[in-house]
Image (cartoon, rainbow, N blue to C red):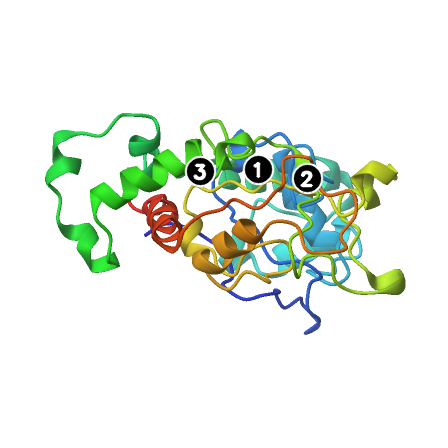
């Protein structure tokens, strides 16, 4: 199985405080045009730096303090990072380039699920038995892929090689619009200030998704079955202005199981 996340509902920052959102998967960021659930970063450098200076996450005051820390821990990070004023600008660039370069290496692809979805199943895929350890079989995965493309219409948003449209949607699903008052997570609205972006969050990549529970921006999806059940039910009663694409799916229990099987296969090479 593939994937790289904290595995907890919220991550713990440097001071012991919890982050306000679930940590999205770190793989394949190179192929993403927007980073974070609210899209506040547009490139890998921004993606790498914003957590450094977030007071809840790593809490660095400025780049000088980052370089001073790296210099003081040169046995771990090397001697190329110096905090002297004359070198600070050049070494700031090194930090940015190093973090971005590392993120470029975190790539996952050509999973079994992707091969099934894009009709690239091989003879070895047809005969493999190791997927039984995950209670999966290729026939069920294929049925799930057909649902993903068809009846469930997941591919309307989870499209392309990274299985994300790189856009933002207000799904209106039960348990996602939580909190009250000034602490409520308004999603993309906090970046754009557009009323239409209220409660809209970025479509996450599904590549490697089995290894990144819990799900959704607030971690309210405990499992892939839970996620599919929420989408199957459609927008919660009383939720206004959810995405026009959102409606109950009408999946049977057998179809739900097949769709979950397909999603599981997106974490298997």
Q: Which residue is nearer to you in this view: 112 or 97?
A: 112
Q: Residue 127: percent from the left, percent from the top?
A: 10, 40
Q: Is residue 11 above or below residue 161?
A: below
Quadrant holding the C terminus: top left
* Residue receiving disc 2: 169
Q: Is residue 269 visible?
A: no
The residue furthest bottom is: 16
Q: Residue at x 66, y 47 (%)?
A: 82
Secondary-structure class at tag 2: strand
- Label drawn at residue 100: 1
Disc 2 vs disc 3: which is toward the camera? 2
Please report whichever mark, 3 or 1, sits nearer to the chain's N-terminal start: 1
- Label drawn at residue 105: 3
Gap between marks 2 and 3 measured at Cα: 28 Å
Please report whichever mark, 2 or 3, sits nearer to the chain's N-terminal start: 3
- Label drawn at residue 246: none
Q: How many marks?
A: 3
Q: Is residue 259 above or below residue 154?
A: below
Q: Residue 28: percent from the left, percent from the top?
A: 48, 37
Q: Is residue 208 visible?
A: yes
CB-based contact (under 8 Å), mark 3 and mark 1:
no
How many C-alpha atoms fall within 10 Å of the one at disc 1: few (<14), some, or many (≥20)?
Answer: many
């Amino acid at each position: 199985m593939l994937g790289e996340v904290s595995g907890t509902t919220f991550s713990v920052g440097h001071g012991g405080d919890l982050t306000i959102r679930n940590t999205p998967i770190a793989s394949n960021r190179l192929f993403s045009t927007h980073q974070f659930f609210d899209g506040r970063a547009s490139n890998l450098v921004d993606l790498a730096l914003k957590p450094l200076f977030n007071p809840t996450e790593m809490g660095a005051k400025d780049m000088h303090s980052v370089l001073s820390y790296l210099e003081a821990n040169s046995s771990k990070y090397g001697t190329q990072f110096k905090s002297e004023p004359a070198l600070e600008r050049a070494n700031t660039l090194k930090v940015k380039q190093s973090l971005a370069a590392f993120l470029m290496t975190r790539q996952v692809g050509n999973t079994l699920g992707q091969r099934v979805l894009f009709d690239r199943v091989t003879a070895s895929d047809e005969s493999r038995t190791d997927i039984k350890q995950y209670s999966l079989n290729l026939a069920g995965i294929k049925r799930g892929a057909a649902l993903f493309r068809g009846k469930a219409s997941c591919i309307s948003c989870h499209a392309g090689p990274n299985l994300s449209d790189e856009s933002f949607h207000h799904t209106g699903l039960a348990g996602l619009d939580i909190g009250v008052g000034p602490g409520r997570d308004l999603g993309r609205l906090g970046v754009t200030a557009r009323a239409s972006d209220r409660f809209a969050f970025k479509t996450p990549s599904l590549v490697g998704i089995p290894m990144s529970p819990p799900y959704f921006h607030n971690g309210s999806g405990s499992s892939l079955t839970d996620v599919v059940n929420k989408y199957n039910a459609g927008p919660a009663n009383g939720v206004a202005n959810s995405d026009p694409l959102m409606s109950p799916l009408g999946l049977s229990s057998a179809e739900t199981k097949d769709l979950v099987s397909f999603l599981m296969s997106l974490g298997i090479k």
